[in-house]
Structures are given as C-alpha cells and as structure tokens.
Amino acid sequence: MSGIVGSAGTEAARQRPDGQGRLGLPEEHEGQDRTVRRALLGAALEVFTERGYTDAGLTEIATRSGVPMGSIFQHYGGKGGLYLALWEEFREEQERRTAATLTTERSRGEDDPIALFVAGAKAYLEGAWENRRLGRLLAEDDGPTGFDALRRQWDRAWVRRNARLLEVDERRRAGRVRVSVLTTVIGGAARELADCGDDAEAREIVDEVCGILIHLSAPPG
C-alpha cells in the first residue's frame, strides 16, 4: 500500500535488446510497440494459466498473439521475461490502486495509521479479486528460475513499507513480527480470493479479512 505494494522492475520488460530503452522512438512506433506488447502479454497469460509456466511454449504464445516469435525476444527476451512483465504489471496496478486509496483517505483527514493500513489492504484485496486470473498464476510455485528469490525480496520490502505505514518501530522484534503476520494475512487472503466463485463471496472474504486486520493491528497493551 504504498506500504502494501513495492516496486522492483524487470528491465527485460522495459528495455530494447540494444540497451537503448524506448526513448526517442517516433510516436507511431511507440503505439505499435504497445499493441505488440499487449498482445504478447495477453497470450502469455492465457498459455501460462492453461499449461503452467514450465509447460508453456513460446510457439503457442506467438501463435495466439498473432505476433512473430522474434518479437517475444525483442520485447521480453524470452519466456521468463514475459512472466516477469506480467508480475510487474500486477504489482504496479496494485500499487496505483492502493496509493490512490491512501491519498483519498488522507485528503478526507484520516491520519490514523491502522485505519489507513486497513483501507490500503482492502484496496489491495479488491484489486486481487479483479485481477484474480493473473493473481492465481503468480501464486503458483511454477515460475522462472530465480523468481522465488525475487518474490521473497519483494515480500521483505512489502513488510518494511507496511511497518512505516503503521508507524511500527522496526528495531523492536515484536513490532516486526506483528507487521510480518499482518502482511502474511493479506497475501494469504489474496490467494483465497483467486478461487472465489462470485463477487458476493469475494466481498465476504475482504470484509472478514479487514476485520481481522483491525484486530491484529492494534498494538499490545
């Protein structure tokens, strides 16, 4: 949440193979690039979801996207780059959503750390439901080599941001543990939402989890 989501980019998704980035391209080329990338990511999500990352084939992704195979390597460097780009897209969208929620709450005069934390968590969980197909894929233990380490690194950053949002003294072990537990609750709830059958069930889970977070967020004593 600005505490709930951090940002750790995948340069494969952002850079051209020649290392020049996308700066300086004519506007029409930028539009074409965006269209190609959107088609590739949409097809990759379909194939990864149906077959899992390990069994997904680049040939099928290229065929479904209607984009030549070479464009996958040009834009993403291969299958791993596609997966990491999807992961980054999910995190960035969650970050935008939760940051906007926190901005709105603060503009209304809300300054209670727990209230802000829960509002951000609710926004994050609602985003997890809306993007459940992608969230379900990313929750699986089937990704590129090294992805688990990258995800753990991001999880640690997530905990630190939540600690700052809750104004917890990270030097105290009890405070660190409390924030780690809260963050784990949110992550677990997001995975549960991926399997919900409808909006009503998802809303029930979000409301239940927010109640749990309010209870667990209260400092001891």
Image (cartoon, rainbow, N blue to C red):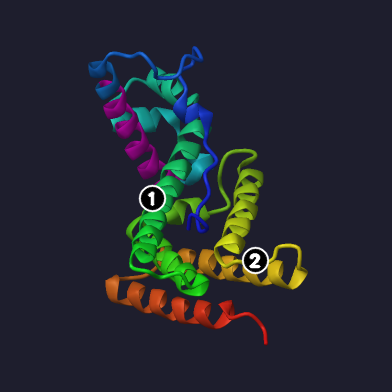
Label 1: which secondary element: helix
Secondary structure that dominates the magenta span: helix
Q: Badge 2 is on which residue?
A: 180
| Whole-percent x, y for residue 179 in the image | 63, 68
Q: Badge 1 is on which residue?
A: 96
For badge 1, the amino acid type reads Arg
Residue depicted at 67% across the width and 87% down the height: 221
Q: Is residue 177 above or below residue 9?
A: below
How far is the residue under mark 2 from the one under mark 1? 22 Å
Q: Is residue 49 magenta?
A: yes
| Whole-percent x, y for residue 178 in the image | 66, 72
| Side of 109 where 218 appears, left or right | right
Label 2 environment density (alpha carbons within 10 Å; few <14, some 14–19, many ≥20): some
In the image, 154 versus 102, the foreground residue is: 102
Residue found at the very far bottom of the displayed protein? 221
In the image, 16 versus 172, the foreground residue is: 172
Label 1 environment density (alpha carbons within 10 Å; few <14, some 14–19, many ≥20): some
Q: Is residue 180 magenta?
A: no
For badge 2, the amino acid type reads Ser
Label 2: which secondary element: helix
| Whole-percent x, y for residue 111 in the image | 46, 69
Residue depicted at 29% across the width and 76% down the height: 200
Q: Is residue 13 above or below residue 202?
A: above
Residue depicted at 38% across the width and 58% down the height: 103
Pointers 2 and 1 in contact (C-beta within 8 Å): no
Residue found at the very far left of the displayed protein? 28
| Whole-percent x, y for residue 195 in the image | 41, 66
Q: Quadrant of residue 67?
A: top left
Question: If you read the primary sequence from the N terminus, does the residue marked by circle 2 or circle 1 appear first?
Answer: 1
The magenta segment is: 32-51
In the image, 175 versus 53, the foreground residue is: 175
